[in-house]
Amino acid sequence: MTEHAMTWGIAGLTAMGVVVRPFRWPEAIWAVFGALLLLAFRLVGPEDALAGVAKGGDVYLFLIGMMLLSELARREGLFDWIAAIATACAKGSPRRLFVLVYLVGVVVTVFLSNDATAVVLTPAVYAACRTARVKDPMPYLLICAFIANAASFVLPISNPANLVIFAGGDMPSLSRWLSTFMLPSIISILATFICLYWTQRRALADDTLAADTQRRPLSGSARLAGWGILLTAIVLIAASAMHVDLGVPTFAAGTITTAIVLLLTRQSPAETLKGISWSVLPLVAGLFVIVESLDHTGLTKLLSDQLASLASASQSQAIGVAGLLVGVICNLVNNLPAGLLAGSVVQAAGVSDKIAGAVLIGVDLGPNLSVTGSLATILWLSALRREGLHIGAWTFLKLGTVVMFPALILSLGSLLLF
């Protein structure tokens, strides 16, 4: 029992370190440090630790491929071009710009992942706002944070957490995925838009836009990057339909597209590789080791037994309790470790697709409550800081309470309709 308590304590402190970032050290340092502590105290063996790291193989490949495509698109100006078009199409209307940025955010999240929306679209939207000379860019930037999570379960490729939850388990086929998540995703996207727009309506009413913004021409390399992203999305959708793991296709597509663009433009790969957030990989690996250690304490079995019992008593109650509870917990420990543990619990419990779907919706949408709820939101916050902007945790929490809970409750409720 003492060893179990130490494991839980280290896991809790690791999660706190990832969320709070003491001394402003990167999240990855705390995840790796927690894993090393478990090894040092022999709370997890080297073989089990390696097994935990190995479980994330598909996730690592997926992240590398997506980060390559995102950084390539950023460097070649593709996202700036898209944001500029949205600004020009707004024709001086802040409300129209709000809607257009939201639509762009949906597309980027669905087909390129929520991290791309946070990392790449955020500075592009800020640049577009600066070009349009808006009074307050925050209403438009908030879109990047909220839609990154609200639209992140439309497809398996829309959020790395989706792969994490099913790591080592049965990833649903594309048809199963769409039958489970299409309606909840539509409701999540619409509800988030309505609530977010309502909270920002006064700021938008007081804003003005420059109506004479110029569209920049799209370079050949940016166009090629765009085609690469489009083809990657098609390949990934096809892979999902054929029930193929997404890591290898994503890695291959990102690597090939990047190599072609760099060769044609005669650029060194050094700058592109330098712009990638490589620290995400040890962060995920360290969290996999943490979850592996928790599994050995019997926590996964305990939670899976509780979930299975709740599901046998009432499916509707299991959907509501599991989705809401996981959604809130994600904001306490971040959705990556929560997703890793939740995935293990769901696989062990052997529950229905709808209950598993409720857990995934909680992991994906729940983090819209706080600035530390998901990796995407943390990355969005970092992007704001690079532009000299800031939003307080309490301010975001108040906003997240209004925006997240209606979307989460309605999305979970929609699982019971069919």
Image (tube, helix red, strand yellow):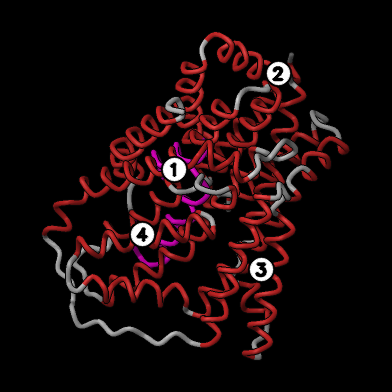
Mark closer to the observer (3, 2): 3
Specify whether residue 365 is painted magenta.
yes
Q: Position of residue 11 (x, y in %)?
A: 65, 31
User: How far apart are labels 3 and 4 at the CA level?
Assistant: 24 Å
Residue under label 2: 301
Assign a secondary structure to mark 1: helix
Crowd around label 2: few <14 · some 14–19 · many ≥20 (10 Å): some
Amino acid type, residue under disc 1 in the picture: Ser
Q: Does residue 315 sit above or below 42 in this rendering?
A: above
For residue 291: magenta?
no
Identified by mark 2, the residue type is Lys
On residue 328, the disc is none
Residue behind mark 3: 254
Q: Main secondary structure of the magenta part?
A: helix
Q: Residue furthest right?
A: 47
Viewer-nearest of discs 3 and 1: 1
Residue 103, disc: 4
